[in-house]
Amino acid sequence: MLNYIFLLVGFVLLIKGADLLVSGGSAIAKRFNISNIVIGLTIVAFGTSAPEFVVSTFAAFEGASDLSLSNIVGSVVTNVLLGLGIAAVIFPLKVTKGTVWKEIPLSVLAILVVLVLANDQWIVNGGVPQLAWTDGLVLLAFFGIFMYYTFGLSKTSSDDPDVAKSKEMSALKSGLYIVGGLVGLAYGGDLIVNNGIEIAQQLGVSEKLIGLLIVGPGTSLPEIAATAIAAKRKNVDMAVGGVVGSNIFNLFLIIGTSSIVGSLAYDTVLNVDMVLILGVSLLLFFALFVGKKHILERWQGVAFLATYAAYVVFLIIRG
């Protein structure tokens, strides 16, 4: 019974943390005349990826490679299909040109890089597929490039007409909101994941299925909550930027760090899931050219949610 109570407490902390993070991030963006897309790609993305970072890094340290990798894979799928699906149903998401042609393609590149690095030894000489520390360095180098790009974006987007300076919230209060939001997300995510795992183990669920079906979606709850709240407030740049940025953080930063902490044995069964998230990312890209250009409409959000439901069924059958 305590597991279920702590799970509920985790949800409360998570939702409130996301609310504080979006409020504080949006206020800072307006105060310093920084584009919301930049805040979404950095502060929101990093904050909401904290649970994935903690879970995957500790799992790698403990030698639980399946849990470490499946957590990220499950999180990326959940972010796009469930997170953006819910957000688009709440309010149609108008995606900026930069996100369509730069950030989303970069997230596709991240998937391809991880897929190649994980399988290169197996493909070339039939060796054991894994992500070694050298692969981790490559992924972190790509992450550095992404951060450099984002820093440049903050300069070029400072004259964004959609961003007006605001004095409604002081800098100190905005900072406290962000810190409070990150704390709520971290503790809430930890409670949800730990108690979710215990409940799943009591039900006799396998480790890989736990990662893809329980831990991955569980650690994605901050992204889902932050994205849904941003969409409700019609802050669509932060909603989309948070999801895309989080996926890039997950693939480059978290898998890169986890690979350095402890080489990750890679189960080729995950290739199916990696190809799936590649397809999901491409689906997001092409969806922005169907119907209203560069807008993820409500019916597309419903389609994303239906696709996620089908993926869950597939995992249960395969598991």
Image (cartoon, rainbow, N blue to C red):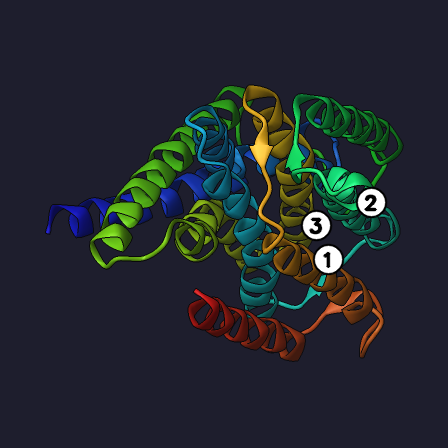
Percent x, y of residue 121: 75, 37
Q: Quadrant of the C terminus?
A: bottom left
Q: Is residue 29 visible?
A: no
Residue 181 sits in which quadrant? Answer: top left
138 lies left or right of 250: right
What residue sits 77% from the left and 70% below the top? 287
Q: Toward the viewer: 26 or 308?
A: 308
The residue that mark 2 highlights is: 161
Is residue 38 shown above or below 152?
A: below
Decide: marks 2, 3 in contact (CB < 8 A)? no
Number of numbered discs on residues? 3
The residue that mark 1 highlights is: 278
In the rendered structure, find residue 237 and report the number of the disc placed on it.
3
* Mark 1 neighbour density, 10 Å: few (under 14) some (14–19) many (20 or more): many
- Upstream in the sequence, badge 2 or badge 3? 2
Residue 84 sits in which quadrant? Answer: bottom right
Distance between the Cα atoms at labels 3 and 1? 22 Å
What residue sits 45% from the left and 38% below the top? 20
Distance between the Cα atoms at labels 2 and 3? 13 Å
* Mark 3 neighbour density, 10 Å: few (under 14) some (14–19) many (20 or more): many
What residue sits 49% from the left and 29% below the top? 60
Q: Is residue 286 visible?
A: yes
Q: Amino acid at mark 1?
A: Leu
Distance between the Cα atoms at labels 2 and 1? 33 Å
Q: Amino acid at mark 3?
A: Asp
Percent x, y of residue 30: 67, 35
- Upstream in the sequence, badge 2 or badge 1? 2
83 lies left or right of 256: left
- Upstream in the sequence, badge 3 or badge 1? 3
- Nearest to viewer (mark 2 / mark 1): 1
Q: Toward the viewer: 17 or 160?
A: 17
Percent x, y of residue 42: 66, 32
